[in-house]
Image (cartoon, rainbow, N blue to C red):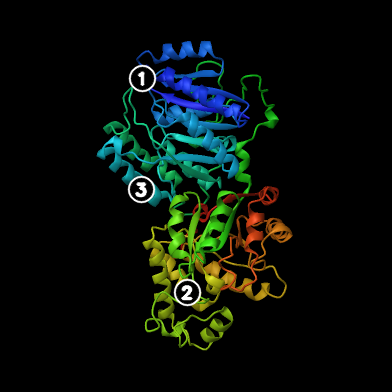
Amino acid sequence: MLLSVVLPCFNESDGIAAAVATALEAARTAADAGDVTAWEIVVVDDGSIDDTAAILASLASQDPAVRVVTHPVNRGLGATIRSGLAATDGDVVLYTDADLPCDLVEDLAKALRLMRVYDADVVAAYRHDRTSEGPRRAIYSVVYNVFVRTAFGLRVRDVNFAFKLMRRRVVDAAALTSEGSFIDVEMLVQAHRAGFKTIQFGVDYFPRTRGISTLSSAGTVATILREMVTVGRRMRPPRQDGPVRPEGDVGTARPEDGVGTASTEGDVGTARPEGRMTVGRLRRQGVARRAPGEARAAADIPERRPLVVNADDYGLTAGVSRGILEAHARGIVTSTSVLVLGGGFAQAAGWLAEVGSLDVGIHLAAVGEDPPLLSAREVPSLVDRRGRLRTSWRSFLPAASRGAIDVEDLEREFAAQIEAARDRGLVLSHVDTHQHLHLWPLVSQVVVRLAQVEGIRAMRVPRSAAPLKRVGINRLADRLATQASAAGLASPDWAAGLDEAGRMHGRRFVDALQVVSAAGHGSAELGCHPGRAADARATYTWGYEWERELEWLTSREARDAVERAGFHLTGYRSLPSPVPVA
């Protein structure tokens, strides 16, 4: 496996030789551990006016693994990283700063191990402690990361920290345009929207001791603010003011989003004429060049249809919640629905803050084994004499049919559950209900109205392929989908998982996926229930096979089945919103 390390630099004559030497040491250490077999160090000189260029020329002449890309004039961090990525040919690519902000030897080894163990596509580091930078930089960082989380739903602790290890497919799929420091946000949001898995780990941070940092300068801050508007607008979900077309869906490499031809020095490859960011395919150190037909084409990615894999009942118990996080970190789960009434919610809610790539929705409950949030006096029509919810839809629906369910009680309880989730810092991507109660018109009107009021942009619409169920359920689902679309709420074109509840593994998983694929739906969802459920079985006697689902969803077979069916993994935030009906 070929490792590429990209080091952007500007006026780094005091430290660039040490940075390159450390990068080489880190690569050799990774090779000794068996994680890589070859390496290249790509240094991008962004128009330095000190002795950086001369030092780099000397280093490149001494070691063929060191390659230099030169910008004749200073173009900014974003352009520098884009040129560096375009010059790489590695199976895995690390981008980090030339001022060595962390222990590169130790942290690269750790990142490679995490990427392998968790089958991650992106490994991003965050700083354990950055107080040594001073209060102004610390305040900038907090405000910036909160903005990114709010605007793009990207739950990454330290989005601009310069340590990101990416697989080749992530680099190939990127269509980056940023000229400045907003490049980190653009890179991670695109990876998230494309369904690539990102994991994070903490590192000890070493503040700059040589050279000059311009990150908090007025010019750099102004560039970031400008690109928040220009580049950020293209990354936000499509606006609801006209016919909607998925805007790039991350993997789409459109000519108008290109980066132009990079100014390079030596045989490093350039961006293609149409402007999409690609990479040179010249292998170094005896690694053969790929034939043209063997290169992975980013343009192929949009042909795959989006698939959301949603795990229900996060918060049911601590064990079920841990299993869902594991199914995301090591497997194909891209989304989860949080059950705030669950006994494990208080403990498990905080764990979601550490996971930046998992979409989180609300699993509203008006039935089940757990008590409501509100008191019996506040929601009398939802509870029995003991103040408990009805245990199943089988008792809820007859009560609703005879008018025994007060819509206002339902709305109060659901609104309280949404508020409880948001009080724990959760940014909600979608809404659904426990036991799919929102298929029922009385419930659907409440859920749709609350989604609009609360700014939740997507809704799950369950469906059935079972002969005895599908006529009635799918008629209700069609009505719900029409309601959701009229309200401007996104939803997949089809869904599976209701028929396979608690047993979405093996043959059932493959068959469900094939049915959805063969029908030609443009987007789809698979619902599932992974978990470590030793703490759930005594209370929740549903017969679910939580561990078997977890084992399957983290298997290579499941990922291969998704690819064979022509889907790419994504979350609810990446689905295009329909135009609401006035």
Which is more toward the observer, 486 or 69? Answer: 69
Q: Which residue is mark 1?
A: 11
Which is more toward the observer, 446 or 139? Answer: 139
Q: Amino acid at mark 2?
A: Gln
Nearer the camera: disc 3 or disc 1: 1
Q: Which residue is mark 3?
A: 147
Nearer the camera: disc 2 or disc 3: 3
Q: Quadrant of the N terminus?
A: top right
Q: Is residue 249 in view?
A: no
Give the numbered dot on residue 445: 2
Tell whether 338 sits left or right of 532.
left
Tell whether 121 sits left or right of 427.
right
Q: Are marks 3 and 1 in contact (CB under 8 Å)?
A: no
Q: CA distance from mark 3 to mark 1?
A: 31 Å
Q: Quadrant of residue 47?
A: top left
Give the numbered dot on residue 482: none
Query: In this picture, is 464 found above or below 567?
Result: below
Q: Are marks 1 and 2 in contact (CB under 8 Å)?
A: no
Residue 444 at x, y percent in the picture: 50, 73
Precedes in sequence: disc 3 or disc 1: 1
Callout 2: helix, strand or loop? helix
